[in-house]
Every structure is written in structure tokens, then in C-alpha cells.
Image (cartoon, grey):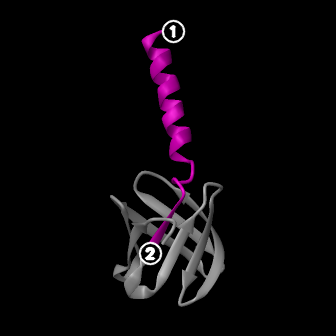
Amino acid sequence: MSIRSSLGVAGLWLAVAGCQPAAPGVYRAEAADATYRFESDGRAYVSVLGTTVVATYTADAERVIVSGPQGTTVLTRKGDLLLGPTGMVLRRVDDAD
């Protein structure tokens, strides 16, 4: 395989990988009493003040976009944090918490 072909395959792989949902995990914003649970199938369970709704999400290296019955929320990745609108900070927590 030539270098050009190898680079093309690598680029295609990165493009496909970038469209996949982020690794599953739980993020919590204590100040807002909110929890976001991201599943590997692209579903998200968003709990705010004791009420949970099912949403879908897509993710790339910089953002997680959550779409549900109440609309769409764009979260920005910063390490193990997701930064949301109005200063909301979601911190990744252990699934067992």
C-alpha cells in the first residue's frame, strides 16, 4: 500500500471515529442538580431536579450536542468537564455514584 493510500485510509478512519458517540459516562453539575448519563448507543438520560428525559447526542473532539424534548444543548469538552450554557459545569463522575 502506498503512503498516499495509507494516509487516505487513516483520514477516513479518523473521520468515521469522529462521528461516533463519546465513550459512555456520567457527568454531574451539582450547582444545577443535573446529571447527564451518556450511553454508547447515542442515547443520553438527562436528569434535572429529579425529572429524567431521554435524549440523543452526537460528539466530536470539541463538543457534545444533546437533543431532546426541551431542545438542543451544546456542551463544550474541557478534559473531564463538559461546559454548558449559563456557566453550567458538568464533571465526569464514577458510574457507581
Percent position of residue 95, x then y = 51, 65
Residue reaching furthest to the front: 96
Residue reaching furthest to the top: 1
Percent position of residue 22, x then y = 51, 54
Residue 77 relative to residue 21: left or right: left
Q: Name the residue under label 2.
A: 28
Find out whether residue 12 is within the magenta segment.
yes
Residue reaching furthest to the bottom: 49
Q: Quadrant of residue 69?
A: bottom right
Percent position of residue 13, x then y = 53, 32
Which disc number belongs to residue 1? Answer: 1
Q: Do the residues labelled 2 and 1 touch (CB within 8 Å)?
A: no
Magenta segment range? 1-27
Query: Which of the two residues, 93 or 51, is positioned nearer the viewer here?
Result: 93
How many numbered discs sit on the rendered protein? 2
Question: Of marks 2 and 1, which one's residue comes earlier in the chain?
Answer: 1
Residue 45 relative to residue 32: left or right: right
**Tag 2: amino acid:** Arg
Residue in the image at 50% along x and 16% along y: 5
Find out whether residue 20 is within the magenta segment.
yes
Q: Give how far apart the Cα atoms at labels 2 and 1 are.
A: 46 Å
Q: In which quarter of the image is residue 50?
A: bottom right
- Above or below 37: residue 60: above
**Tag 1: amino acid:** Met
Percent position of residue 42, x then y = 63, 58
Q: In which quarter of the image is residue 79?
A: bottom left
Query: Which of the two residues, 20 or 96, is positioned nearer the viewer here?
Result: 96
Mark 1 Cα within 10 Å, few/some/many (few <14, many 20+)?
Answer: few
Element marked by disc 1: loop
Residue 24 relative to residue 52: left or right: left
Residue 38 relative to residue 11: left or right: right
Residue in the image at 65% along x and 55% along y: 41
